[in-house]
Amino acid sequence: MSLIRSERAAAGILLGAAVLGLVLANTAFGSVLQEVKSASFGPASLHLDLSVGAWISDGLLAVFFFIVAIELRHELTVGELSSWQKALHPAIAAVFGVIAPALVYLAFTAGSGYEAGWPVPTATDIAFALGVLAVFGRGLPHRIRVFLLALAVLDDLIAIVIIAVFFTSDPNLVDLGLAVVCIVAFGLLSRMLRGRLRGPVAVLMVLVGILTWMLVHASGVHATIAGVVLGLVMSREPARRTAHAMEPWSNGLVLPLFAFSAALVAIPAVPVDRLSPAFWGILVALPVGKLVGITVGGWIGGRIGSRASRQSTGMVDGLVVAALGGIGFTVSLLMNELAFEKIAEVRDEGVLAVLLGSSVSIVAGGIAVAALARRYRRLHPHA
């Protein structure tokens, strides 16, 4: 379990699962795997007659977002984002890191009818970016990881808002109201997790959490938002213990299974010049848009932030973090599924674009991190 908690191992497993899915999708097994992914099961009366792929993206991925929300709350309350002075610099970098790739994407897709895919290249995969930093960044000062973590956490917060606002249509207010009641109950129960009541309360919380997910899904809001809200309302110490216990399952099962499922795409046998504008928009926006946006935002944030903020991350350090910011992967793949849910061929091209764009950022970020780490080790050989 300790190995799976490693940022390096988590990134390697995630990449391996995506590559395996892409390879198998283009073999004789591809059609069988696609049939399995599209097979439906679950009670239709509860709006849960979902495909295997939907169970993975809507159900299992809620676990990942639950853990992300716990980490987000920790950073906002006692961590690196606990004051506006600390949060301002990475917040501005994160906002620019969302705006720039969205604009790059829209520049490629203007007038094509695929403009709704603008959220796809705006996300940064926090686990993967930290994994690349851990693999190649031996000797780098801790402040670079702190800045990357703060940036990625804020990026995830923006992604959650985008999913909730732009991928929700005609919500059922009754189901949503019942979900709110369950969320309040979940938060209150988490404050009772002590003594002899711990076991029964924990079981009851699991049941309330599942009911919350079902109600959010039935309401028309994307079901992963249930995981986010439950993570935010859970009492701090029980939440951290729960996230610690669930982290290996998220790293070793949930995220790889989602990456494998999302990457089950047959490479389209079309000439390069016939690929959709959405493909090119995502492919360029992830590595280039993120690099430009985070760099510019980081520079502006450093100029208007506190003196400590200006000293914490220099221009070169910011460029390295910006290069890693283009690793979209998990959340970008989810955004792609949501944006092009009804356009299968564009959705498949979007998956390929996310994988290729993220791969460019992995290579560029890895080279930049390794070069900067060598520089720091040379300047501080005994650090």
Image (cartoon, rainbow, N blue to C red):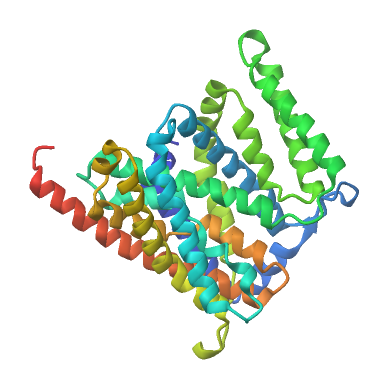
Does residue 45 appear left or right of residue 231 in this picture? Answer: right
Residue positioned 55% across, 84% down in the render = 275
Residue positioned 36% across, 48% down in the render = 301
Q: Residue furthest top?
A: 195
Q: Quadrant of residue 320?
A: bottom left
Q: Residue furthest right?
A: 45
Residue 236, how many percent across, how many down?
54, 23
Q: Nearer the viewer, residue 125 or 309?
A: 309
Residue positioned 40% across, 66% down in the render = 287
Q: Is residue 56 visible?
A: no
Residue positioned 60% across, 48% down in the render = 160
Residue 207, how many percent across, how many down?
75, 30
Relative to 37, say whether 10 is above or below: above
Residue 32, how many percent across, how many down?
67, 70
Residue 151, how many percent across, how many down?
42, 47
Relative to 8, say whether 347 is above or below: below
Q: Quadrant of residue 12?
A: bottom left
